[in-house]
Amino acid sequence: MSVLEVAKQYKEDFMQGHGKAGAKDKLTRQVPGIRRKLTHAEISALYADNPIVQNIVDIPAEDMTRHWFTLRMKDDQLARDIMARLADLKAKDAFKKMRMYERMRGDGFISLGVTQRSKFELQDPLKLDSLLSIDYLHPFSSMKVSELLINDDVFDKNYGKLENLRISRASRSGIQAVETESLVHYSRVLHDQTKRLEDEEQGMSLLETLYDAITVLDTSLWSVGQILHDFTFKVYESADIDNLSKEEKKELSMILDFMFRTEALALIATGESLTKQTTPVSGMKDLLDFVWEYISASARMPKSVIKGQEAGTLTGAQYDVMNYYARITSAQENEMKPLLERLIRMLLWAEKEPGGRIDPDTVEWEIKFNPLWSVDSKTDAEIRKIVAETDQIYVSNGVISADEIRETRFGQFGVSDDFKFSGDDAQWQRMANEVYIAWKENGQHG
């Protein structure tokens, strides 16, 4: 079959059905929803090889724990003692790593090393009334877990919750390793899991949903590197080239490449020419911006944060960064706070921990996360003034009482340096606009 006949056959095949939805239609062959389930080895390789992946995994975990929290109690000394005990247990670092493991592998855990009055097995529920002390907190990932036993009874109050887990335990002495498995009751671990498909037990790694975007980003980096490597190249024209053999052309190319790279002067004969060619790069920025926008949307992180903007700082009207911190705040309240409260309750129950054995329900205490970001003092004062004026309007019109305002703004433990802002995105947007206006009028930092 001639080349022309092949071309005609290809044209006929392509034009069938207007070129759509046929075997040669690339758009049809690309089917969404084909999940790529990554192994732990593939996840480790992605994380170790790509610094952008490391930022996506690490930065939110660092932001959630960077400024930690304040423990408010009527007994200030007890609150300080408990915070000191958490520091001794390296709880801040443990919670950070637990969230990193959750983002990277789908599940993050902290093992609770405790001492109890009587001998116990790991598969036994942890009894708070027999707790003496908390000895250590060890973060680990689902790599150590071979099985998660989750309650699947939709009519049970604990539906969807972890009941037991089977953990791989290993000890090494020299070159000899001893590996065993233990069934562990859920009360002996803290478990961080935010994404889990209904028909699966283990959480879903964030890197699985980002895999295509990471592949495109890696391809973009490679392509840009190739373009920069061959950004400019020389073209040598001579009538004698046609008369050279392959070996002679190769030798001449090597000599000329060496000379024209190392010498500022090119010696060529009459009728020969030497020109430089530059690789066109128009439109490349738009393509790379698209990749970054997709990565940012998939990770739900602003590009500036992924690229390593200094944490906790805002310049101008960075609404995307403010929304990112709002999401971090929401994760602190909804996901990390219950685990922290459980740990503190255990410290209060433990007989040999600060304060002795205390029933947490008999004392007033509260976890208050420290602010994730701040503005300059002048803008902060303006925000407080706006809030105070708004509260005054609410009180004057009978919308809310002065006592309710006092409780909302200052809480049960007295005056603090922060307010409890509540409301929807419109309220955040309105506040952001006010901050931006003040910033424009008075300069970036007052």
Image (cartoon, rainbow, N blue to C red):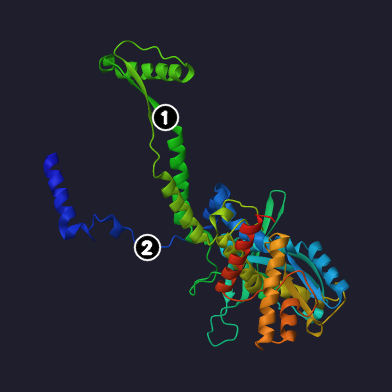
**Within 10 angstroms of label 1, few (less than 14), some, or many (20 or more) residues?**
few
The quarter in which the N terminus is drawn is top left
Tell me the CA gap for discs 2 and 1.
Answer: 39 Å
Residue 164 or residue 87, whichever sits in front: 87
Q: Residue at x 70, y 75 (%)?
A: 388
Q: Residue 234 placed where, x, y %?
A: 38, 24
**Within 10 angstroms of label 2, few (less than 14), some, or many (20 or more) residues?**
few
Q: Residue at x 40, y 39 (%)?
A: 281
Q: Residue furthest front?
A: 441
Q: Say which mark, if any, is on residue 232.
A: 1
Question: Which residue position holds label 2?
Answer: 32
Q: Residue at x 41, y 16 (%)?
A: 255
Mark 1 residue type:
Thr
Q: Residue 379 placed where, x, y %?
A: 68, 63
**Disc 2 versus disc 1: nearer the observer:** 1
Task: Answer with the quarter of the image where residue 240 lies.
Answer: top left
Drawn side of residue 2 relative to residue 199, left or right: left
Q: Residue 351 placed where, x, y %?
A: 86, 76
Any part of residue 128 in sight? yes
